[in-house]
Image (cartoon, rainbow, N blue to C red):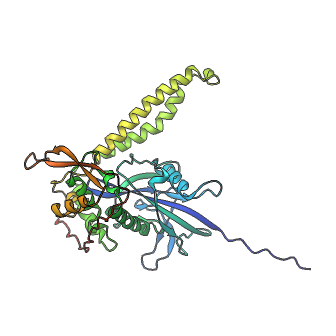
Amino acid sequence: MEPTTQPKVPEFHVAVDVVALTIKRNLLQVAVVQRKGTQSCIRDPKGGVVREVPREPFDYALPGGHVEWQGESLVEAACRELLEETSIEVKPEDLVQIGAYGDVGRDPRSGRTVSIAYVAFSPDFASPFAGSDAANAKFMDVVEVLADPNRLEFDHNQMLRDAISRVRELMERTPIALKFCDEEFTLGDLRHVYEVMFHPAYNPDADTLRFADRIRREESKSDSSIAERQIHVLSKAFSESSKNELMMTMPMNDMPMGLSSGRKMTRDQDVLAKVQKLLEEEYRRASRVSTPGEKSAREKMKLSFDAANFARKAELIEGFIERIPGRTRQSSSGTGKPAQLYRRGRAEKLDPPLIIPRRATKPAKRTAK
């Protein structure tokens, strides 16, 4: 009797990817990593097939990786991968699932991989730097990431665009935009977040190269991002050295008892935590949304809503925002009527929703050389 051959079990992998979106320096930005290794997985724009090709300096990917098959939920895996690859820490409740991506051929490597993608939208991300699973990590302008010669691996281009659509929906139906406002804010502050997020540059059919070209020309003549880059480098160096420095302060013969060394360890940890907190706050300050009135290419990449109409719609939504009686703020120019100050209301959902009409995409004119 001939032995029966067992059918080969197919390789089936489950992965997670995270689209960490924020608004910095007046543009929508996303956290990206550059993988280690010599090969990138890039989709052929003509045939749509993903192939392994020699890695280029302009190849990027969203943070992500495989789910541990024992004792880890999908959202826990997403939090872990984001932390491991970028050192950005989020909680499960900060992530919103945007979809599953499992087309045949989306990953040219062995087996078939289905990835569950999540989006996080927050102003409070610290300066990202590469963890053990990545060679480099940083925030980049979305229009820059999506513009040639830059390339996103796998189907991460589609994930990014789907994440933007999901955040836009959330901004219309939840108070998520208030994350980008101070505890006390004006309607102009709130309106500014919507004007940036709903700019046609982030539409699926946008010619991102034309928008990116305007920013590139301006950045080449400006040092506006130098402070941000310096803080990023300092934060990375500090993080990498702090652990070793802590260990050097601990007398080895005291370690079994953990008394005197434990007290010093706690004191040093407190100091390090405070310094890191200051670095994170300085990073956020250096990369804040530009103030209205700056006529830079970045400032121009936002819509211009009718102030009175936006105010009427926002105040009509019960529990969205609340006036602070007797509290106003002078405009940045120092002229004109002081603006009324508001605070967040108690609503978790906007009813009625704050619907933002979609603007058709128009090509951005190239800056004259």
**Which x, y percent locates residue 80?**
53, 51
Residue sticking out furthest to the right = 1
Residue sticking out furthest to the left = 335
**Which x, y percent locates residue 170?**
37, 62
Residue 266 left/right relative to 151: right
Residue 111 left/right relative to 306: right
Residue 9 left/right relative to 250: right
The number of numbered discs placed on residues in the rendered structure image is: 0
Residue 256 left/right relative to 282: right
Q: In this view, does 8 lie above or below 216?
A: below
**Residue at (40%, 64%) from the top-left corner?**
163
**Which x, y percent locates residue 166?**
39, 65
Camera-nearest residue between 131 and 357: 357
**Residue at (33%, 61%) from the top-left corner?**
350
In what quadrant of the picture does the N terminus appear? bottom right
In what quadrant of the picture does the C terminus appear? bottom left
> Residue 10 sits in which quadrant?
bottom right
Camera-nearest residue between 8 and 169: 169
**Which x, y percent locates residue 178?**
31, 53
> Residue 196 sits in which quadrant?
bottom left
Can residue 223 be seen?
A: no
